[in-house]
Image: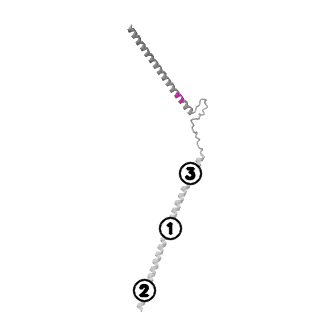
Amino acid sequence: RQENQEKEKQKARELAEKIIEARKNAWEAQRGVEEQKRKQAEDLAVTKRELWERARKEAEIERVKKQDLIMQIRALERVPAPKVKVYDPSETPDTGTIDAMSLVELRARLNALKMEETFTREDKRQSILARKRAREGDLTHRHERLIEFRKMASAE
């Protein structure tokens, strides 16, 4: 009986040691899980901080860009727009002279003078050709008369 009791005590001790060991392992596992959760929470906090900082910087950059754009728009609004006078070739220049003509009128006048010069040249050419033909006709007539006189002179 004593042996049985010893065996049972031994079993009880072993069981107690196993329970203590199991509790110790459970406690270590729980500490490991808690450490892992704490590390995840810390990583999450760091990530959140980084994201928040990046968003803040981007918002600051966007704000600066908008502010710069607004300043540029205001500067453009303050500067008077250059008054560009559109050139109209049919309008006479405001020089105050009596004979001032617009570019269109000057071109028309130039074309008219060119046409007049062309007609004058053509008339002169025709006149020269007519005189040339008349002279040729006169020379031909004189030549024929001279031949006739020579024939009559040789016939006498």
- Which x, y percent locates residue 2? 42, 91
- Which x, y percent locates residue 116? 53, 27
Q: Secondary structure at mark 2?
A: helix
Q: Which residue is mark 2?
A: 11
Q: Which residue is mark 1?
A: 42
In 3D space, how far apart are the residues under numbered discs 2 and 3 (Cα atoms)? 85 Å
Q: What amino acid is found at the position of numbered circle 2 in the picture?
A: Lys
- Which x, y percent locates residue 28? 46, 75
State the quadrant of the C terminus. Answer: top left
Which dot, 2 or 3, sits closer to the camera? 3
Q: Point out the tag, 2 or 1, that comes first from the N-terminus.
A: 2
The reply to whether dot 2 and dot 1 touch (C-beta < 8 Å) is no
Q: Indicate whether residue 112 is drawn in magenta.
A: yes
Q: For residue 19, what is the image quadrant?
A: bottom left
Q: Secondary structure at mark 1?
A: helix
For image coordinates 51% across by 26% down, the residue present is 119
For image coordinates 49% across by 25% down, the residue present is 122
> Would residue 140 be found to the left or right of residue 80 on screen?
left
Q: What amino acid is found at the position of numbered circle 3 in the picture?
A: Leu
In 3D space, how far apart are the residues under numbered discs 1 and 3 (Cα atoms)? 40 Å
The reply to whether dot 1 and dot 3 touch (C-beta < 8 Å) is no
Q: Which residues are magenta?
A: 111-115
